[in-house]
Amino acid sequence: MKRFSRRLGGLFLAALIGFAAPALADPAPVGGYAIVKRYPHDSRAFTQGLLYRDGFIFESTGLRGRSFIRKWNLETGAIEAERTVDSHYFGEGIVDWKNRLYELTWTDQVGFIYDIDSFEKLGEFSYPGEGWALARDDKRIMMSDGSAFIRFLDPETLKETGRVQVTDNGVPVTNLNELEWVKGELLANVWQTTRIARIDVTTGRVKGWIELGGLLKEAGVTGDRDDVLNGIAYDPVADRLFVTGKLWPVLFEIKPTEAR
């Protein structure tokens, strides 16, 4: 009898909570894009991290034995600088901070610090769990780890200072991957999808989506296995947004469009 009464009480409490809980907001709107320009991209590059700085694209790639960081000319694709990552490591995302370049590795819980001009290794840093991608604003670095959480790091010490869970309509958005800070929003590729999330990092709420499925055909890839969308870079001076994918032969400059 006690077990039965407890069950009824639990059902009553659940019903009461459900009645009192506010209704969830509608799912975030889904917008599209327009292609502005195409640029050459190395189809052998298993793109993990991407950023734009002073007219150049900085890129990091993954896979053990095939990971590297690279600086290349946006217009011509010519490589200006490159460094191979030790074959023990699976390279992941990168971000610039002052005269340094930070790089994550996937499962080794270690990151590398480089001089951004020479790619000379200056040091290492550590973090718990997996490392997927990095981005920054003027005060902090943001990190994804394949979960629904974004970590915040001190840009000088690289120690975690907090984190936020990313949700859409109350549902956690997992597999957050490559990141880029654009006009006060954090953009994030969602691994193995064709969408980029536009995230309010104060609340973790997805404000909207950019659906890029049509780019697969434009790039001549299927997106079925390894050649998935991954890579976001932004030029704040000229307001240009660049996207690409793993093993893609092209990098696109796009203009997001509003949901219809």
Image: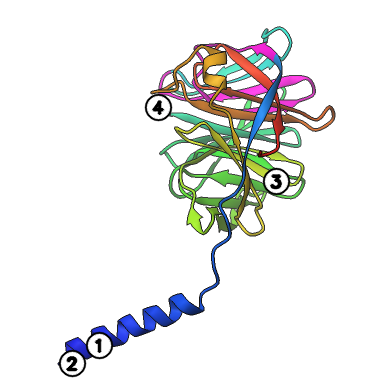
Quarter holding the N terminus? bottom left
Residue flagged by tag 3: what amino acid is it? Glu
Label 1 vs label 3, nearer the camera: 1
Farthest left residue? 1
- Residue at horizontal 24%, vertical 83%? 7
Q: Which residues are magenta?
A: 38-65
* 24 up-or-down from 183: above or below: below
- Asked whether the beta carbons under mark 1 and mark 4 sit within 8 Å of each other, the answer is no
The residue under label 4 is 88
How crowded is the residue under tag 1: few (<14 C-alpha within 10 Å), some, or many (20+)?
Answer: few
Q: Secondary structure at mark 3?
A: strand
Q: Are marks 2 and 4 in contact (CB under 8 Å)?
A: no
Q: Nearer the viewer, mark 2 or mark 4?
A: 2
Q: Quadrant of residue 17?
A: bottom left
Mark 2–mark 4 Cα distance, whole angstroms, equals 59 Å
Can you identify the residue that label 2 sits on? 2
Can residue 42 be found in the magenta stretch? yes
Amino acid beneath label 4: His
Q: Mark 3 or mark 4: name the one nearer the start of the chain.
A: 4
Give the CA distance from mark 2 to mark 1: 6 Å
Kind of residue at badge 2: Lys
Closer to the chain start, of discs 1 and 4, is 1
